Every structure is written in structure tokens, then in C-alpha cells.
Image: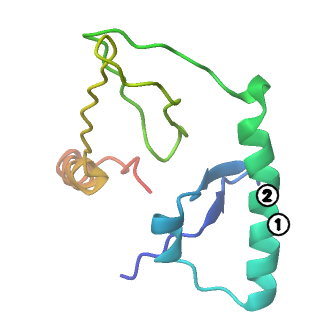
């Protein structure tokens, strides 16, 4: 079974479900005609403007001990600039969970329990 991920994915109602904005990730899966590429990049300009609109952003200043978790396919995230000084430092640690492991577990349990698998 070949798995193909689209750059822009819509749900069953035609609403935006996921899009791949990161150049390094998108580049490896982007195989469209030049005409579609122009449309895609025009859409990226629109999405970029929407992302940079303060009305669509949440800013949260973390303090030592804070932890944030999110689905990287559902939440766009970034960090603001800061000035490193003797009094100001920053330490961030990232971790990724492979969804294939979760989907495999869901498929195995669905089969064992004879219920539909909730994964796509």
C-alpha cells in the first residue's frame, strides 16, 4: 500500500484539515505540475498572511518547568526573538512521537477487539 501525503489536505466537508508549510518537509513530497505549483505558492502567500495576523496568534511566555505538547500537524508554532545576556538564558528541549507507533497500536487493538479502526 502506497501512502501519499498531500501538501494541503481537506476533510470530508472540504474544510482545511492539514497543510505542510515547512519547506524542508514539503519539498520531499511536492510533486505537482508547474501550473499547480503557482497556485500552491499563491495559497501559501494567503496562509502566511493569515498566520502573521495577530488575531490568529496566541503568545505565551513560558517559565522554568513549563511543558507544552501538541500535534505538530495541527498546531503551527514558533518562538519569538530574545536577547541572550548574563541574566537571560533559554533552554528548550524537543521530543517527537512517531504517529506510526500509535496507529499500529490502534490497528492491532481494533483487530483484536473486532471494532473499526479510528485511524486514517
For the residues labelled 2 and 1, the Cα–Cα distance comes to 5 Å
Residues at discs 2 and 1 in contact (Cβ within 8 Å): yes
In this rendering, the answer to whether 83 lies above or below 1 is above
- 71 sits left or right of 92 in the view: right
Instruction: Name the side, left or right, on which 83 lies relative to 10.
Output: left
Instruction: Identify the residue position indicated by label 2 in the image.
Output: 45
Identify the disc placed on residue 93.
none
The quarter of the rendered structure image containing the C terminus is bottom left
Q: Is residue 99 above or below residue 68?
A: below
Residue at the image position 17 percent from the left and 50 percent from the top: 112
Instruction: Please tell me in which quadrant of the rendered image residue 32 appears.
Output: bottom right
Indicate left or right for 12 with 45 as reference.
left
Q: Which mark is residue 42?
A: 1
Q: Residue furthest front?
A: 86
Pick the residue in front: 25 or 52: 52
Measuring 51% from the left and 36% from the top, which residue is drawn there? 78
Q: Residues within 10 Å of mark 1 (few under 14, many from 20)?
A: few
Question: How many marks on residues?
Answer: 2
**Location of residue 107 (image quadrant):** bottom left
- Residue 42: image quadrant is bottom right
Q: Which residue shows up at 30% across the image and 20% down it?
A: 89
Residue 103, image x, y percentages = 29, 52
User: SS at mark 2?
Assistant: helix
Q: Position of residue 87 (x, y in %)?
A: 31, 10
Mark 2 neighbour density, 10 Å: few (under 14) some (14–19) many (20 or more) = few
At numbered mark 1, what does the secondary structure look like: helix, strand or loop? Answer: helix
Q: Nearer the viewer, residue 85 or 5?
A: 85
User: In the figure, 116 relative to 75: above or below?
Assistant: below
Q: Nearer the viewer, residue 97 or 10?
A: 97
Q: Residue pushed farthest bottom?
A: 33
Which quarter of the image is occupied by the N terminus? bottom left
Q: Position of residue 37 (x, y in %)?
A: 73, 80
Amino acid at each position: 500500500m502506497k501512502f501519499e501525503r498531500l501538501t494541503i489536505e481537506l476533510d470530508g466537508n472540504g474544510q482545511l484539515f492539514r497543510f505542510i508549510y515547512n519547506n524542508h518537509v514539503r519539498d520531499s513530497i511536492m510533486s505537482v505540475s508547474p501550473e499547480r505549483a503557482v497556485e500552491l505558492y499563491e495559497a501559501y502567500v494567503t496562509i502566511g498572511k493569515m498566520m502573521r495576523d495577530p488575531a490568529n496568534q496566541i503568545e505565551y511566555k513560558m517559565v522554568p518547568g513549563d511543558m507544552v505538547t501538541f500535534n505538530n500537524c495541527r498546531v503551527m508554532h514558533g518562538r519569538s526573538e530574545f536577547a541572550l545576556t548574563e541574566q537571560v538564558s533559554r533552554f528548550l528541549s524537543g521530543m517527537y512521537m512517531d504517529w506510526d507507533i500509535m496507529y499500529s497500536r490502534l490497528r492491532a487493538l481494533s483487530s483484536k477487539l473486532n471494532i473499526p479502526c479510528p485511524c486514517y
